[in-house]
Image (cartoon, rainbow, N blue to C red):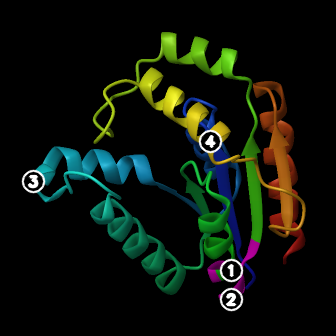
Amino acid sequence: MKRLVIITVGKTHSGKTTFAKDLEQQLDNSLVIDQDNHAEFINTHYKTLLPKEGPNTIKYALTQTIVDYAVNQTNCHLILCNSNRARNTRLELLDNFHDRGFISILVDFDIPDHVLQARIAESQRSTMIFRSASTFHEVLIRQQAESHKANIRGPIEGESDHLFTIKSSDEVQFVIRRIVDIAHNLR
């Protein structure tokens, strides 16, 4: 059976987690793997294992273990819910899934920064996911600076088998329906 891997791309508060949860409810035999959950688990139970600086290697190792298990021990469609903003890392991830026979879908959340700032101002989300920031506003500022400095752009056609760009929350249900249709056509 062919499976989908749906990978979200976007800045904080762009709607990636809400989208992933909604998609999981509508896409039969699917599973959300959300790196924020792994960060919160580690920060709550294993804070002393966190590196003082540099990449959060324990978080990445935990996520990779869960992804490997889901790939090898289930027949679920996978919804990877994290920012995936760095193109080189995203392409490596996509190559890995293509090598395993998955059909890839990127969902790029290209939400204007003023909308993200308003969402952050109203946010009730836990900050237990943080290691090197203290607020979501700080995360957004860092992401904006990274985008300008590293010239980070969203995904482009050809990176994945399917690409959807969401510019407002009005487009979410349309994209979910399209992904569900793609999954039904795999049968």
Would residue 177 be found to the left or right of residue 125 on screen?
right
Q: Is residue 29 visible?
A: no
Secondary structure beneath dot 1 equals helix
Q: Are circles 1 and 2 on residues that touch, CB within 8 Å?
A: yes
Q: Amino acid at mark 4?
A: Lys
Label 1, label 3: how far apart the Cα atoms are: 33 Å
Q: Amino acid at mark 3?
A: Thr
Residue stretch in magenta:
96-103
Residue nearer the viewer, 102 or 52: 52
Is residue 44 inside the magenta stretch?
no
Dot 3 or dot 2, earlier in sequence? 3
Q: Nearer the viewer, mark 3 or mark 2?
A: 3
User: Mark 4 — residue?
Assistant: 149
Q: Amino acid at mark 1?
A: Asp
- Percent across and percent down for residue 59 are 33, 60
Q: Is residue 20 visible?
A: yes
